[in-house]
Structures are given as C-alpha cells and as structure tokens.
Amino acid sequence: MAGFLKVLLRNVLQGPSTDPYPLGPTFSPDSIRGKVVVDPTMCIGCGMCVHVCTAGAINIQHNENGHVITIYRNSCCLCANCHLYCPTGAITLTDDWHSAHEQAVKYQQIEQQHIDYEPCLGCGTPVRVMPLALVSKLYAGKPDVDPEHVRHLCPRCRQMEDAVRTYNLQHPEAPASGNDEA
Amino acid sequence: MSNLLNKLSVRSPWLFRINAGSCNGCDVELATTALIPRFDVERFGCRYCGSPRHADVVLITGPVTLKMRDKVLKLWDEIPNPKVTVAVGICPISGGVFRDSYSLAEPLDHLIPVDVNVPGCPPRPQAILEGVVLAKKIWMRKLGIEEG
C-alpha cells in the first residue's frame, strides 16, 4: 500500500514520462547521425566517399569544368563512413533527423553540390582550386609560399614551382637572362 | 450515416506491420514507438492490430525479397480502402544496403502505391512518429475529412 502511494506521489510530482513530440519539443543526443551535408568549399572530388559508402548512395560526376557530388538520402544508411574517410573533412552528418516525407517529394531527397573548376594560373587548364585550409596546412612550415597563389595551380605547375623554389632554379618558362654567366 | 461514421472513427487509424524481409532493426524501432510510454503512439489514436482487415495504415519494413513479394501483395490487398502505405527505413524505399541483390524483387513503390517514406537505418522513433502523423493526415484526406 505504502509503495503504491509512493509511486503515485512520484508520478504526480514528476509528470508523465512521455516525450511530447510531435506535439511539443523533443531531444537529440549529441552523437545522433542525421542528414548528410557536403561542404562545397572543401570537397575535392577524390571519390573516397563513393568507394567506402556502404549503401552506394554517393555519386560524383566529373566533367571538364567541375564536378557534381550527389548523395541520395533515401539510400543513405547513416553509417558515417564518408565522414570518417573524407580526407578534407567535407562531409558531415548533421543532427537533423526529420526524414519523413510524402511520396511526391521522394526523388528530391538529395544533397547535391556543384564544384566549379578555375583555370590554372600557370598553364590555364581547368583545376579544382585547393581549399585554403588545406593549403595552409600543407605549406605550414614554408613562410615564403603564398597559399593564395599556390592553391590556384594545377599539380604539375605546383611541382614545377616547388622544384624552382627548392633548388633555386630558373623557371623554365621565364625569360632566360642570367644563364650565360653560369 | 457513413459520413458520421467516418467522423467518429477518424481519430484512430489502426496500424498494421508487414516485415518484408527486414533485418529487424526497423521492427525494433516500430515496437519501441508503440510499446514504451516514452514515445506512445496511442496518443494519436493509433494502435497496432493483428489482422490486415482491421488496419488503416500499413507500415512496411525491409527490402521486398523475392520470397516475401507475393505475401506482401496478398496482405496489402486484404487491407480495406482507403489505406495509407508507409515505407519505414531505407530498404523498402530504395533497397538500401541490399540494393541490386539477387534475392530482392524491386523497390516497394514499383509494386504498390506508397504514400509516406521514412528513411533511416533505422529511423528514430520520433521520425517514425512524424511519419505516422503524416500518414494520418493523408488518411483523413483520402476519407474526405480535413484535420481540424
């Protein structure tokens, strides 16, 4: 009898334990894995996420002037492998778990980002401009490198610049002026 | 008379579950949504029923395997109209991680008309509740009664 009264009193004081959602607010744990988003400033289109995606929900289409990354949310199994393996940290899982939708909008449940290429400052071929955060990390110990210039170069031109800088060479495409004395 | 009956019964769509070859993840979430007081689906007048003939909303989990396809179609046919079909989890929606497997028939919406999709692997109980509330709204629309 006393035990029953104790439970009754506790329930009266604490109120119902039912989560009021969707009529009221709810909670989300910190570690919840919700909808996937891609940061277009960081995605370099390497294709690692396509390779590791458990459900095959990611597609990257390359063309001459850029690439398009598409994540199909209705195939995504929220395993977060893409987030784990993305070398630039471009893919993150938000805490947005509101996924229920009507059939009419089924094929609009995608995350799509268009990443445009820009001409290389050295040779003019279209290249993916490297994310500034990535370049700053790469050239952290080299104060004489201008990250803003280097990120606009294609890998070949970047190699050339590196060689010129490291061995103090003459740039092959620069006008030869001091070579006669050497 | 039938309109009056509709208005009286409209508060409580009964739910029916079909496991079309699911891994049981989504079924556990469905059971959680129904059974524990925290997510209490009965607040919306819904309750699970054992027979498809009593059901109004059908929740289908799992990719439709070849073995289950005819059974799913048979069960679905037994549910009286108007019915609302809810695909729970990514498997019935797109095939999910089992897509293109030799043992799968095809996505659920190629076989029967689906009304609501709740993707997730598995979806949260709250997301399923969202789906059930959406299904209830569609069910009322099909009955010709808008929710007041």
Image (spheres, coloured by chain):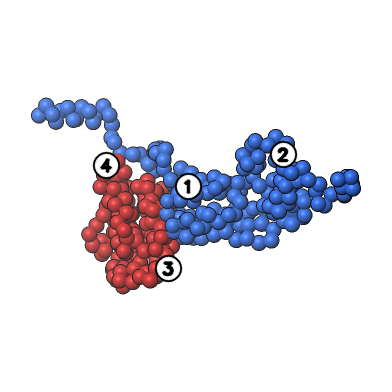
Chain colours: A blue, B red
Instruction: Residue A21: name its quadrant.
Output: top left
Which residue shows up at 28% across the image and 35% down it?
A16
Q: Disc 1 versus disc 2: distance between alpha carbons?
A: 30 Å
What residue would you read off at disc 1? Answer: A84
Tag 3, which secondary structure? loop
Mark toward the viewer: 3 or 4: 3
3 and 2 marks on the same chain:
no
Q: Answer few, some or many: residues within 10 Å of disc 2's Cα (few below 14, many 20 plus, some between 14 and 19).
A: some
Mark 1 or 2, nearer chain start: 1
3 and 1 marks on the same chain:
no
Which residue shows up at 24% across the image and 57% down it?
B49
Q: Disc 2 versus disc 4: distance between alpha carbons?
A: 62 Å
Count all numbered tags in the image, as a single digit.
4
- In the rendered structure, which amino acid carries the disc numbered 1? Leu
Tell me whether the residue at label 3 lies in contact with that at label 4, contact meaning CB atoms closer than 8 angstroms: no
Tell me whether the residue at label 4 lies in contact with that at label 1, contact meaning CB atoms closer than 8 angstroms: no
